[in-house]
């Protein structure tokens, strides 16, 4: 095999994504935190936001209406959606090492326009990507096979020369179903070791 392209998910690979923490910071800790997290993030509103069918303001308005949130609660929720996205230890360094070794680096992420703008303004990793496929820009979500096809076609990549790194096993399996190599991310050291097993030298 000859890997030329390394594709990174963003949430829980490059930055933290913790729905339960967002909910507890926004609405307080309770025994219902998991249930509320599921209600918010598995809601059709969040799905449409992630697919670029709603703006953040439109989603906030729908959440206020459907869940009875106040305007203040909406503002606090979307503040913590962004503010909790801290860098995962070591991943940006890994991306830099891979790029210096001559590989192309890409992003494939289920993500919201406003969150992407926040990440670009807050951190310096986005310019490292040679290309980025974002769900809100293509109207598709992982593990829909069409989003992996979009990644390949947008960037003129061969599946057999590409590896995708994601923290969710079903997203990795989606990539593998598209002929892309897959790595389920646990931590940066494990990820680096898995890449080296695939012959990526850095």
Image: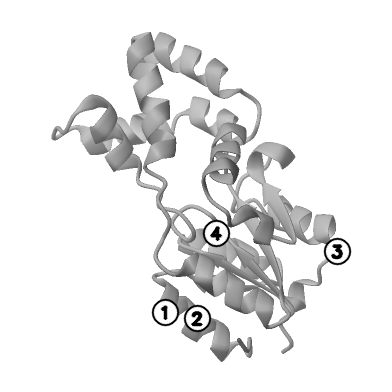
Whether the residues at callouts 2 and 4 have beta carbons within 8 Å, the answer is no
Q: Quadrant of residue 83?
A: top left
Query: With 15 as the anchor, is 115 left or right in this view?
Result: right
**In-front residue for pair 121/58:** 121
Split into 4 quadrants, where in the image is the N terminus?
A: bottom right
Q: Nearer the viewer, residue 34 or 103?
A: 103
User: Within 10 angstroms of label 4, few (less than 14), some, or many (20 or more) residues?
Assistant: many
- Give the camera-side residue of 39 and 138: 138
Kindly state the secondary structure of the residue where label 1 is placed: helix
The span from disc 2 to disc 4 (Cα, nearest Å) is 19 Å
Marked residue nearer the N-terminal end (3 or 4): 3
User: Which disc, if any, is residue 192?
Assistant: 2
Alpha carbons under labels 1 and 4: distance apart: 20 Å
Element under label 4? helix
Mark 2 residue crowding within 10 angstroms, few (<14) / some (14–19) / many (20+): some
N-terminal of the two: label 2 or label 4? 4
């Amino acid at each position: 095999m000859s890997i030329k392209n390394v594709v990174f998910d963003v949430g829980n690979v490059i930055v933290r994504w913790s729905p339960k923490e967002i909910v507890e910071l926004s609405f307080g800790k309770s025994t219902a935190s998991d249930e509320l997290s599921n209600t918010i993030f598995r809601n059709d509103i969040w799905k449409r936001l992630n697919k670029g069918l709603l703006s953040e303001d439109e989603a906030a308005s729908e959440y206020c209406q459907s869940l009875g949130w106040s305007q203040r609660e909406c503002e606090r929720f979307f503040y913590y959606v962004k503010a909790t996205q801290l860098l995962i230890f070591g991943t940006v360094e890994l991306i830099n090492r891979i790029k210096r070794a001559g590989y192309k680096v890409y992003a494939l992420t289920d993500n919201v326009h406003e969150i992407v703008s926040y990440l670009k303004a807050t951190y310096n990793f986005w310019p490292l990507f040679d290309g980025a496929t974002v769900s809100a820009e293509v109207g598709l979500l992982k593990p829909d096979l069409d989003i992996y096809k979009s990644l390949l076609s947008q960037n003129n990549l061969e599946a057999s020369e590409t590896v995708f790194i994601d923290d969710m096993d079903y997203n990795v399996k989606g990539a593998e179903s598209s002929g892309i190599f897959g790595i389920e991310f646990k931590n940066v050291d494990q990820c680096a070791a898995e890449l080296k097993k695939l012959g990526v030298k850095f």
